[in-house]
Image (cartoon, rainbow, N blue to C red):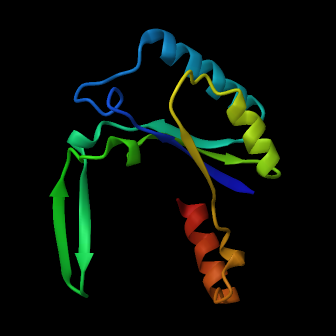
Amino acid sequence: MRFMVIVKSDEKTDAAGAQPSAENLQEMGKFNEELVKAGVMLAGEGLHPSSEGFRIAYSGATEARIVDGPFAESKELIAGFWILQVKDKAEVIEWMKRAPFREGEIEIRRVFELEEFDNATPEIIETEQKLRKQA
């Protein structure tokens, strides 16, 4: 099973120019190394603040409106993420209990596997698998 671990932002992490301390970077690096050595980390990155981001709002078949950051509600923003491949929910919980956070919140969501979609035909699954190999 794959899970996305969403690290929530706050006023400090979403401030323009905000960066983690050297100590935090070192702790996170050690934790990431453990995840990699255990073979569960597929991806993981920190994100720039919302002041450097933008959203695209869709309405109708051809309408797309660009909304530049910063965004008002920092508690609903993402500061970073991991994609982990583990055997079950309990394992991802155990890993995240060891994460070097002292405050804040994370959200954990299971990633859909293509085979879980009722409408995924064998042709669709084969095409998606080819694309993933190319990526």
Looking at the image, residue 74 lies above or below residue 89: above
Residue depicted at 61% across the width and 22% down the height:
100
| Spot occupied by residue 121 in the image (x, y as percentages of width and height) | 67, 89
Residue depicted at 64% across the width and 88% down the height:
123
Name the side, left or right, on which 118 lies relative to 72.
right
| Spot occupied by residue 81 in the image (x, y as percentages of width and height) | 52, 42
| Spot occupied by residue 41 in the image (x, y as percentages of width and height) | 66, 40
Is 14 or 87 nearer to us in this picture?
14
Is 31 or 11 nearer to us in this picture?
11
Count of marks, rendered view? 0
Name the side, left or right, on which 79 lies relative to 109.
left
Residue depicted at 77% across the width and 36% down the height:
94
Question: Would residue 39 be visible to someone looking at this image?
Answer: no
| Spot occupied by residue 119 in the image (x, y as percentages of width and height) | 64, 89
Looking at the image, residue 7 lies above or below residue 104: below
| Quarter location, residue 64 | bottom left
The quarter in which the N terminus is drawn is bottom right
The outermost residue toward the top is 23
Question: Would residue 123 be visible to someone looking at this image?
Answer: yes
Residue depicted at 20% across the width and 84% down the height:
62
| Quarter location, residue 127 | bottom right
Name the side, left or right, on which 105 lies relative to 76.
right
Is 66 or 93 nearer to us in this picture?
93
